[in-house]
Amino acid sequence: MKGYIEERAVEIAKYIIETNTTVRETAKIFGVSKSTVHKDVTERLPKINPALAKEVKQVLDKNKSERHLRGGMATKMKYKQKK
């Protein structure tokens, strides 16, 4: 694995932990795809820094458990703006 990929994975992980952002939000900030962010934190990071990977996994699991609520709120706002 190239050095810049490892650095990016660690930077992304630290950002997600500090800000509790979703994969999509993080992808926009770092200018990469959400697939890249997900692969960095789920596949690459455990090989680089297992402790950091566990922390990120907790944030991602929390986000996953709340995503149906965020989706519902987004739909509500969408139709509220149409009125």
Image: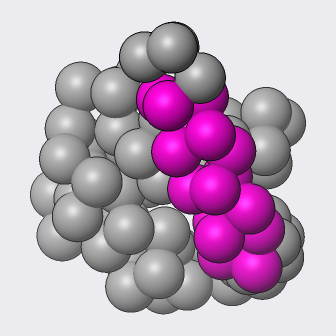
Q: Check the image and report above or below for 49 versus 24.
A: below
Picture residue at 64% right of the left edge, 66% below the top: 67
For the residue pair 16 and 5, the one nearer the viewer reads as 16
Picture residue at 83% right of the left edge, 36% below the top: 18
Q: Check the image and report above or below for 49 versus 27.
A: below
Picture residue at 38% right of the left edge, 68% below the top: 38
Q: Check the image and report above or below for 34 versus 76.
A: below
Task: Please say which color scheme the image uses.
Answer: one colour
For the residue pair 78 and 46, the one nearer the viewer reads as 78
16 displayed left or right of 5 = right
Q: Where residue 50 sits: x, y (%)?
A: 69, 83
Q: Main secondary structure of the magenta part?
A: helix
Q: Quadrant of residue 32?
A: top left
Q: Quadrant of residue 66?
A: bottom right
70 displayed left or right of 71 = right
Q: Where residue 5 sits: x, y (%)?
A: 26, 52
The residues colored magenta run 63-79
Q: Check the image and report above or below for 48 versus 37.
A: below
12 displayed left or right of 64 = left
Check if residue 32 falls in the magenta segment. Answer: no
